[in-house]
Image (cartoon, grey):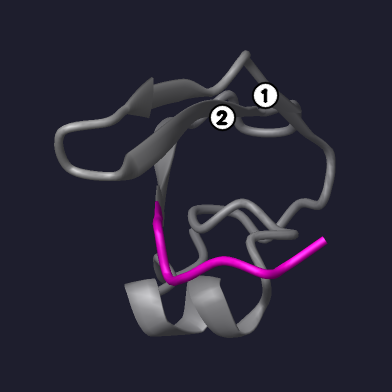
Amino acid sequence: MKKMMTDAEYVANKGLQCPRCGHGELDTKDPEFNNIGAKITVAVTCRECEYEYVEIFHLTGYLDK
């Protein structure tokens, strides 16, 4: 089995591959927003190895329209 990606490797790859098997076909569920911690989480499942994990997104700023 392939070695699990580190968080840094996963982020550098822009979350486009399963951190367990490296497959690129991923299913996601609707994001959940936590306004207390300004964080969004997204449940992800790999279609190849069925690994389930959660992506975490943090607020980093804003842009004017």
Task: Identify whether 49 is placed above or below 8.
Answer: above
Please say whether residue 60 is one of the residues in the magenta stretch: yes
Packing grade of label 2 (10 A; few <14, some 14-19, many >=20) is some
Q: Earlier in the sequence, mark 2 or mark 1?
A: 1
Q: Is residue 6 visible?
A: no
Q: Rounded to the nearest whole Å, what is the CA distance between mark 2 and mark 1?
A: 5 Å
- The residue beneath circle 1 is 28
**x, y percentage for residue 7?**
35, 72
Locate residue 27 relative to residue 7 in the image: left or right: right
Locate residue 41 relative to residue 22 in the image: left or right: left
- The residue beneath circle 2 is 44
Task: Identify whether 31 is placed above or below 24.
Answer: above
Locate residue 49 relative to residue 48 in the image: left or right: left
Q: Is residue 37 visible?
A: yes
Numbered disc 1: secondary structure: strand
Numbered disc 2: secondary structure: strand
| In front of the other: 37 or 46 | 37
- Disc 2 residue type (three-letter): Val
| In front of the other: 40 or 10 | 40
Q: Examine the residues drawn in magenta and state their main secondary structure.
A: loop
- Disc 1 residue type (three-letter): Thr
Cβ–Cβ under 8 Å for marks 2 and 1: yes
Specify the segment rendered in magenta.
Answer: 58-65
